[in-house]
Image: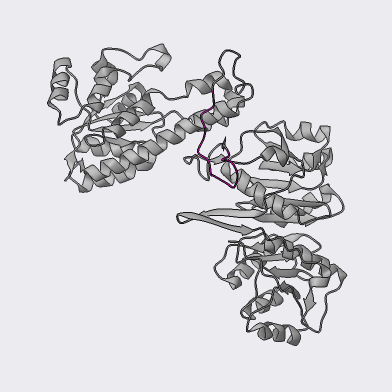
Amino acid sequence: METPIKSALVSCYDKTGLEEPIECLNELGVRLYATGGTADFIRSMDCMVEEIGDLTGFPAILGGRVKTLHPSIFGGILAVRTSPEHQSELEKHGIDTFDLVIVDVYPFAEAVDRIHEIGEEALIELIDIGGVSLLRAAAKNYRHVAAVPGAAFYQPLVKLLKTQNGGLTLNQRRFLAKKTFNVVSAYDSLIYRYFAESPGLNDAPDNLVLKEAVLPHWTLPGSPVEGRALRYGENPHQFAWFTGNLDALFSKLSGKAFSYNNLLDLDAGIRLLNEFDETTFLVVKHGNVCGAASDTSVEAAWDKALAGDPVSAFGGVLLTNGEIHSATAKKINDQFFEVLFAANFSEEALQILSAKPNRILLKSKNGALENAKVRTVLNGMLVQDEDMFISQTDHLKTVTTRVPNDREIDDLIFAEKIAKHLKSNAIAVAKNKQLIGAGAGQTSRVEAVRHALERAQRHGFSLTGAVLASDAFFPFPDSIQMAHEVGVEVFIQPGGSIRDNESIDYCEKNELCMVFTGVRHFRH
């Protein structure tokens, strides 16, 4: 059964999208109350609204720090409507109740990324007190009040109110309460992470030594490990932490706090980088390598890695097993990236790259990565050994009359390493130890091939002389034919299909080369 909304309190920093719910509430005859700036916005829509100050008898004070923190406001939100005692107190003090609370909190998360522009004093002013308190109070009293924590909920709210005669059910209010506490907890965790990661804020004064609150942790073999707070999870509203010893892997030379995705991309990149002995540069995005090249110098490897897919490289994680010098640093400096991991940096290169303080610069310590792969699944965990197999020349079995030459063998091994570290189904197309096309995460292998070839062509590469690597066998010759039609003549795959002969026969008829490794490299 829906309970009608008769009164609403609105306080929004960002007014984007607010017109629709205000128009809906106004049409339903809901009595509107709002804080100063929001009240002005509502008036500009020719809607009636009462200011909070008229209820409390107090204007906003302390430069706006105190606006809503008053019994006339929180009494109207927290009162239990079925309690005679509460109703009596409301009448005694002349307090009106609120059925709906809409709040968009101060943009602390966005401001953290601009702290070097605005300064800490301005940032601290964007720690929302009143707005978060309003949301917590409304969510706590969900049996009688609906909490709406931001613009993402405006359209669903309007749809419900229009189809339910201006009311919300108890289950709907409870769902909104859950979402509200999620928004509030994420907001508070962002503030905590700012203080936790800020230089100079982690050393307790001599007379104030307190035990840090222990973050949630996994119980791994051995003792439990406390977590390191991350900037956020896969998305900004998700809290995240890391358990482990990053200091054994690299030194952080500059930059903001890590996010969950930064560490996922670093894990993917470092594991692939460890496959190479020669100078190599990688670009990783969303757990997949989108640029890769090996060459005689770091600068040449960077040029080739970026050229492989300059579009996907935007905002990626960069990794090299070589030292960054000034010439390479100047080129990299033109690229937007989140993280740069390198064996070393020259002093001039570090000066160039650290000029933008948010960039995370990491110097490798060559620490060992965990060999066991652990993932949560359903109500437990999956654990497996890391895929450590690396093909060498003597592992390769040529199954066609045409055999690969030395350059092609180098490219085949290079391409197989890349395919091994792409999400399945995975295809890597390489030429002269440069990744020129990749297809990853496709549910069809032929689609992965199509993606890889199209990407190579889109970025202007000729596929004549290129090689193609697959992380698993080709069940049909269609993928081979597709690649051959645009110039690819050399292939590497594990083999093992009951229809291997169809792919081999196609290669034989067209004088192509195919090499089997005997080892599959699925990566889900």
In this rendering, does residue 51 appear at all?
Answer: no
Foreground of the two, 307 or 210: 210
| Start-end of magenta stretch | 211-225
Q: Position of residue 352 (x, y in %)?
A: 77, 33
- When asked about the image quadrant of residue 120, the answer is top right
Q: Position of residue 444 (x, y in %)?
A: 56, 71
Decide which of 388, 334 is in the foreground and name it. Answer: 388
Identified at 77% across, 59% down, the residue is 434
Answer with left or right where residue 138 lies relative to residue 450: left
- Classified by dominant secondary structure, the portion drawn in magenta counts as loop
Q: Residue drawn 28% across and 20% down?
A: 52
Residue 327 pos. (x, y %): 83, 41
- On the rendered structure, is 32 left or right of 123? left
Q: Residue at x 70, y 70 (%)?
A: 519
Residue 296 vertical placement versus 101 (above, below): below
Residue under the point 77% across and 56% down: 293
